[in-house]
Amino acid sequence: MKRIWLFLPLLIMLNAGEDFISHYEYGEMLYNNPRGVSCAQCHGEDGSGTIIVELKEQQELQTISGTDIRNKSLEMMIESVNRYHEIMPRYYLTDEEVKAIYDFIRKKNKLDMVSEKKNSNP
Ligand code: HEC
């Protein structure tokens, strides 16, 4: 009868396993390090896009940037991540993983809006 107490913490841990990290944290983790090449590197911290490289070609400054992906639909994001591009790598992420990234970008930008509003209040 005493033995059950030995297993109790383990059982609690197994039950809580799913909640160890939130859906938001999971999306954040995936966005920042999906298979080694971070979306953030090209699409910025919040999905608004950023300059990837700047190079001078025949006296002209050329820039290559990642696009603003904040307003892309989930369907388009899934389609895009699974397709070959010239610059963007092709990822092998499941639909659930892309959904987590999508939700992360949405939520992050909503949170950013809230904190901006707070800051602009006198
Ligand atoms: C090496 C840079 C790079 C990385 C890393 C990268 N992207 Fe991109 N992405 C681009 C560029 C450049 C484009 C636009 C041109 C194109 O389609 O190749 C793009 C396009 C997109 C589009 C389509 C936007 C449109 O207007 O068609 C989506 C959605 C997207 N990326 C999401 C992601 C997600 C999610 C990740 C991480 C899993 C990611 N990207 C990682 C560079 C990158």
Image: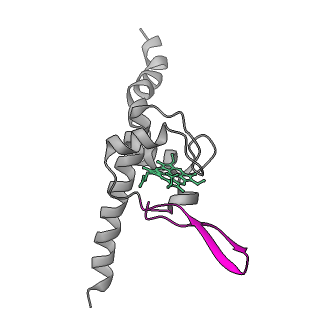
Q: Is residue 5 above or below residue 102?
A: above
Residue 22: tell me if it is visible: no
- The span picked out in magenta is 44-68
Camera-side residue of 7 and 24: 24
Q: What residue appears at the point 38 percent right and 36 percent down from the top-left corner?
A: 19
Q: Is residue 90 magenta?
A: no
Please state if 92 lies on the left or on the right of 15 as rendered: right
Q: Is residue 48 above or below residue 95?
A: below
Please state if 90 lies on the left or on the right of 59 as rendered: left
Q: Is residue 41 above or below residue 31?
A: below
Tally the numbered discs.
0
| Residue located farthest toward the bottom when viewing the structure as drawn | 122
Q: Is residue 43 above or below residue 54?
A: above
Please state if 4 lies on the left or on the right of 53 as rendered: left
Quadrant where the image shows the C terminus:
bottom left
* Residue 13, position as x, y percentages in the image: 44, 28
Camera-side residue of 99 and 114: 99
Quadrant where the image shows the N terminus:
top left
| Residue located farthest toward the front when viewing the structure as drawn | 58
Q: What residue appears at the point 73 percent right and 76 percent down from the top-left corner?
A: 58
Camera-side residue of 103 and 80: 80
Residue 25: tell me if it is visible: yes
* Residue 37, position as x, y percentages in the image: 62, 48
Q: Is residue 57 magenta?
A: yes
* Residue 41, position as x, y percentages in the image: 58, 58
| Residue located farthest toward the top when viewing the structure as drawn | 1
Q: What residue appears at the point 35 percent right and 68 percent down from the top-left corner?
A: 112
Q: Quadrant of residue 91?
A: top right
Camera-side residue of 63 and 119: 63
Q: What residue appears at the point 33 percent right and 55 percent down from the top-left corner?
A: 106
* Residue 23, position as x, y percentages in the image: 38, 42
Please state if 19 lies on the left or on the right of 50 as rendered: left
